[in-house]
Image (cartoon, helix red, strand yellow):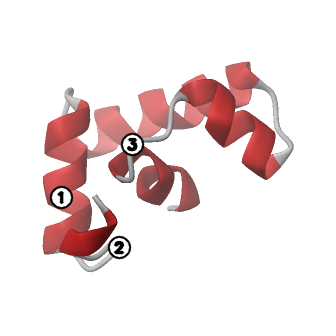
Amino acid sequence: MVILRLLARGCINKEIADRLSISINTVLTHRKNITAKLGIKRISGLGIYAVMNGYVSESDI
């Protein structure tokens, strides 16, 4: 759920890829899988989900 945390904090795909030393395509694949599993399409929705489930605190977003 590292990618979810970074998305919730407002990181863009390239930032996430650089921080984790993975390709942008890998980030996109994980992001697609996260949105499909959770049924949440928007970044704002993922942020709310992350806060409500304790992945990030409100002050992080």
Residue in view at x 75 percent, y 48 percent = 19
Q: Is residue 50 left or right of residue 22?
A: left
User: What residue is disc 1 on?
Assistant: 49
Q: In whole angstroms, how far apart are the C-alphas of marks 1 and 2? A: 8 Å
Query: Which residue is situated farthest in the top direction here?
Result: 25
Q: Give residue 43's quadrant in the image.
A: top left
Report if residue 4 is visible in the image.
yes
Mark drawn on residue 10: 3
Q: CA distance from mark 2 to mark 3?
A: 14 Å
> Is residue 35 placed above or below 48 in the rendered structure?
above
Question: Would you identify the image quadrant in which residue 17 lies?
Answer: top right
Residue 49: x percent and y percent?
Answer: 18, 58
> CA gap, disc 3 to disc 1?
14 Å
In which quarter of the view is residue 36 placed?
Answer: top left
Q: Earlier in the sequence, mark 3 or mark 1?
A: 3
Q: Secondary structure at mark 2?
A: loop
Residue highlighted by disc 2 = 55
Q: Residue at x 65, y 35 (%)?
A: 15
Q: Which marked residue is nearer to the observer: mark 3 or mark 1?
A: 3
Relative depth, front residue between 34 and 58: 58
The residue type indicated by label 1 comes to: Tyr
Q: Secondary structure at mark 1?
A: helix
For the point 20% across and 28% down, the residue is 42
From the viewer's perspective, is the residue at label 2 or at label 3 nearer?
A: 3
Q: Residue furthest front?
A: 59
Labels 1 & 2 near each other (Cβ < 8 A)? yes
Total numbered labels placed on residues in the image: 3
Residue at image location 33% in from the left, 72% down from the top:
56
